[in-house]
Image (cartoon, helix red, strand yellow):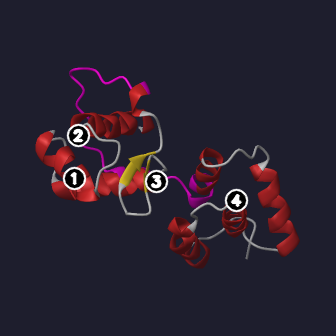
């Protein structure tokens, strides 16, 4: 699914000819120009892509792909399926780890997180946020999700 999502994102940016797009421009290209998704589904796709670290927003709230779109081959007849992108969301733990790994040069991230987790007696996800913040990464994107995860999910090994 991630390969198809990368193709969709690369298609939108290649169609626009730009390296950055506002959310509304991205939605318009995806739904109107390419005709691949209705507007509501286009918004869900963008949210899913952000949550899965395929798109990020810069300080001006403009969308940027997290990968080099030039490396993505898009077949001439490429047509994405109409999947509900929100339904196959990775757990917060995986997404936070991927985000830190993609945005830092640290190789022992998992070990650092586990050390903090054990030292401070906190959830893995919270320790991961702490590590990301110490690396000067924008971890605010995960705060409410981690809070909801802790408050509403049965967390293995706790409770």
Q: Position of residue 23 (x, y in %)?
A: 28, 57
Instruction: Pick whichever of labels 3 and 1 is earlier in the sequence.
Output: 1
Instruction: Pick whichever of labels 4 and 3 is earlier in the sequence.
Output: 3
* Residue occupying image coordinates x 58% and y 52%: 99
For the image, the number of numbered tags is 4
Residue closer to the observer: 98 or 106: 106
Decide if residue 22 is on the left or right side of residue 48: left
Q: Let me know if residue 37 appears in the view.
A: no
Decide if residue 45 is on the left or right side of residue 57: left
Any mark on residue 135, and which? 4
Cα distance in 3D space between marks 4 and 1: 32 Å
Any mark on residue 16, and which? 2
Q: Position of residue 16 (x, y in %)?
A: 23, 40
Query: Label 1 belongs to which residue?
Result: 25
Vertical placement of 41 versus 30: above or below? below
Dot 2: within a 10 Å radius of its alpha carbon, few (fewer than 14), some, or many (20 or more) residues? Answer: some
Residue closer to the observer: 4 or 103: 103
* Residue occupying image coordinates x 17% and y 55%: 39
Residues at circles 3 and 1 in contact by the CB criterion of under 8 Å: no
Residues at circles 2 and 4 in contact by the CB criterion of under 8 Å: no
Any mark on residue 72, and which? none
Q: Residue furthest right?
A: 119
Image: magenta residue range? 71-95
Dot 3: within a 10 Å radius of its alpha carbon, few (fewer than 14), some, or many (20 or more) residues? Answer: few
Decide if residue 107 is on the left or right side of residue 30: right
Q: Is residue 56 rendered magenta in the image?
A: no
Instruction: Pick whichever of labels 2 and 4 is earlier in the sequence.
Output: 2
């Amino acid at each position: 699914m991630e390969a198809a999502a990368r193709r969709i994102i690369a298609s939108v940016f290649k169609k626009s000819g730009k390296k950055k797009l506002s959310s509304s421009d991205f939605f318009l290209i995806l739904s109107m120009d390419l005709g691949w998704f209705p507007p509501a589904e286009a918004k869900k796709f963008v949210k899913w892509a952000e949550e899965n670290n395929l798109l990020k927003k810069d300080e001006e709230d403009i969308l940027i792909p997290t990968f080099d779109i030039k490396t993505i081959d898009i077949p001439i007849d490429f047509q994405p399926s109409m999947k509900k992108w929100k339904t196959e969301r990775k757990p917060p733990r995986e997404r936070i780890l991927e985000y830190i790994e993609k945005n830092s040069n640290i190789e022992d991230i998992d070990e650092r997180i586990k050390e903090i987790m054990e030292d401070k007696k906190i959830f893995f996800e919270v320790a991961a946020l702490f590590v990301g913040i110490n690396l000067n990464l924008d971890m605010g994107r995960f705060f409410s999700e981690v809070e909801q995860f802790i408050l509403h999910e049965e967390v293995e090994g706790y409770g």
